[in-house]
Image (cartoon, rainbow, N blue to C red):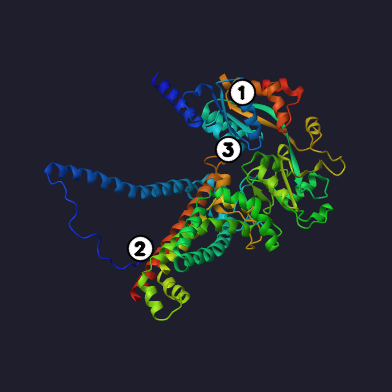
Amino acid sequence: MKNTEVVPVETSGPEGPPRALPVSGRGRSRRRIVERVIEGCIRGSAYSAIIGLFLIFVFIGKESLPIFTSAQVRQEANISKLFLPQEQLHPYSWQPVSEIPKYSILPLFMGTLKVTFVAILFAIPLALGAALFTSEFSPDWLREFIKPVIELLAGIPSVVLGFFALMVMASHVQELFGIVYRLNAINAGIALGLAVIPIVYTVADDALTAVPKSYREASIAMGASSWQTAWRVVFPAALPGVLAACVLGFGRAIGETMIVLMASGNAPIMSWALAKPVRSLPATIAAELGEVVVGSAHYHVLFFIGISLFIFTFVLNMFAHWFVTRLQKRVLGMT
Amino acid sequence: MKAKAIRAATILLNAGFIAGTTCAAGRTVTIKGSDTMVILGQRWAEEYMKTHPGAIIQVTGGGSGTGIASLINGSTDIAEASRPMKPEEKASVKAKRGKDVEEIPVAQDGVALYVHQSNPLKSITLTRTKAVYTGKTTQWEELGVPLGQIIVYGRENNSGTYAYFKEHVLENQDFAPEVLSLPGTAAVINAISKDKNAIGYGGIAYGKGIRALSVSKDEKSPAVAPTQANVLDGSYPVSRALYFYTAGKPEGEKKLFIDWVLGPEGQKICDQVGYYPLKQAKKPANKKA
C-alpha cells in the first residue's frame, strides 16, 4: 500500500566512491557470513507474519469445521440454522445459553455492519479533511503539532475509549439525536470512529504529502487557487493511497471488539435501525468465548464467526488491493 | 519416577505460569471466577495474607463459567461461582482432573432489581419481572409508571447472575432480544444510573447510587426489600448462595484459606463488602459438603 508514492526518481545521494572497505580475503568472507546471517534473520521476520497468519487461519478453520462435519454439532448448529429463519416468533434469534440454543448469526452480522457503517460515515470525512488540511494548508509548525496529536489517539487503549463511550458519550449522543436507547449503534459507531480516525488520517496524510511538489507548482502556475490545487490536483493524484487508508480504517472498524462490547448495548436485534442497540460479531466472541464449554456447538459456532470475519476482511482487502492497483495505473498513466 | 518428576514439574510450571512466580508455588492459591464475587474474594485474600505471611492468594474474575472452565483445565485452584455447578461440568472435572468436585458455599447473595433513582416504582412482582425480561411487557405504563418504553438491562451470558436470573426469574425462558447485555454488574449499574427508563438486575453488593426495588413472589404476597435480614431469613425471593469449587478435597494452603473464609473472620468480611454471611444453622452442613 506504500507504493502509492509517485515521487520521480531523484538523482542518487552523495556522490563519490563509498568508504574504503577492508579487502583482506578473510575479512571479506567473514563479512559475507555475517551478511548472510543478517539477511536470513530479516527474511525470517518477513515470513514469520505470513506463517503466523497461516497458522491462525488453520487453527480457527479447524475449530469451526465441526459445524460441517460433526453430526452431533450439526444437530444443534448447522449452516441453515445459522442463516435461515427458524421459528415463528423469533425467526432470527441468538440465544446460545438456553434450553434449546439458538444460533442465528444474521442479527450479529447486521449489528457489525451497522456499527461499521456509522464509524466509517463519522471517521472518514473527518480523517480525510484533517489529512487534506495538514498536508496542503497548514503551516509546517501546525502540522508538526496536529499530526502527532491525532496519532496519539491511536494509542488510547480501546477499552478506555469504550468506557468513555459507555459513561460519558452515550448520554450526549442520546440527547443529541433524541434516541430512546442510551446505548445504540450510533453511539458505538462514533466511539469506534475515534479509533478509526488516526489510522485513516496517518495513511491518507502520507499519501497526500507524497504527491510530488511539481504537481502543485504546475497547478498554481496555471492560475489555480490553493483549494483548487488541493481538491482537483493533489487529492486525485493521491487517490489510491487515500482509498487504501479507507480500507484499512474499514478493516479496523469491523474487527474492533472492546469499544463495541461496551458501547453498543449488545442486544441481538434483527433491525436496520441505527438508534437501536446492536450486538456485533467480535463483541460476541469476546463476551462468550471465555465461558463456553470447549467442544460444544456454541464453541464451534464462535469459531465459525471468527473465520467468517477473517474471510470477510481478507476478501475485502484483496478486492481493495486490486482496485487500488488498477486506479494507480490509471493515475500514473495520465501523468 | 521419571513420570512423577515430569508431572511435578508440570504442576510447578503451571502454578508458576499462573502465579508469575515459581518459588512460592507451594503457598500460592489461585482463585478465578464469578465477577460478582471478585471484590469479596479480593478482600478475603487481602485480609488472609495480612494474617498469614508467606501465603499468596490471587483472585481474578471473568465470570462463573470462566472460573469453572479454568477448574476443569486445571489453571486455577479454586473456582468462584455465583451459581451451582452443572452436572456436566462436574463430570468434566472428574474426567480431566480425576477428582470429585468439592462444593463449598461461602456466602449468601441476593439479586436485586434496579431502576433509576427518579423512577417512582417501588416494587415489582416476579411474574411482571419475567414479562419485562421476556419482552411481553415493553412499556412502563403497564407497570403503572408514566415513563414510556422500558430499557431492559441484563448481563452477558457468561455470567452466573445471567444464569441464575434466567433459571429463577424467567423460569428458563429466553431473554427478549431487546435486552441490552453488559459486561459486568458494575456496567449495568452505571448504565441504569444514567438512564431514566432503565431496569436492570445485579448483585445487591453493587447497588450504590441507584434504587433497588422491593420484590414480591406474586400479586398476593407482600413486597420484600433486598436487605440483609430479608435475604438471611429467606423472605427475599431472589437470593442465592455463592460457592467455592475445588477439584478434590482442599488441602494445604487451600484448606487453611477456605477454613478461614468459613470462620468468623472471613464471614465478617462478607458483611463488610455487602454480601451476607452463611446462615448459622446451615454452617455445619456446609462444612461437611
Tell me what residue is drawn at x 68 percent, y 27 percent. Answer: B106
Task: Pinpoint the chain carrying mark 2.
Answer: A
- Residue A325 shows in the view: yes
Closer to viewer: mark 2 or mark 1: 1
Q: Which residue is at 64% across, 63% downward?
A: A273
Which SS class for mark 2?
helix
Label disc, if present, on residue B66 of the rendered structure: 3
- Determine which of the numbered discs, if any, sits on residue A3 in the image: 2
Numbered disc total: 3
The amino acid at mark 2 is: Asn
Question: Which residue, given by chain and number where applicable, does mark 1 sit on?
Answer: B50
- Whether residue A319 is visible: no
Point out the frontmost of discs 3 and 1: 1
State the image coordinates of residue A322 (x, y, percent, origin top left): 39, 65
Identify the secondary structure beneath mark 3: helix
Q: Is residue A317 above or below residue A51?
A: below
Image quadrant where one finds the N terminus of chain A? bottom left
Circle 1: residue type: Lys
**For this view, does A156 lie left or right of residue B202?**
left
The 10 Å Cα crowd at callout 1, few under 14, some 14 to 19, many 20 or more, is few
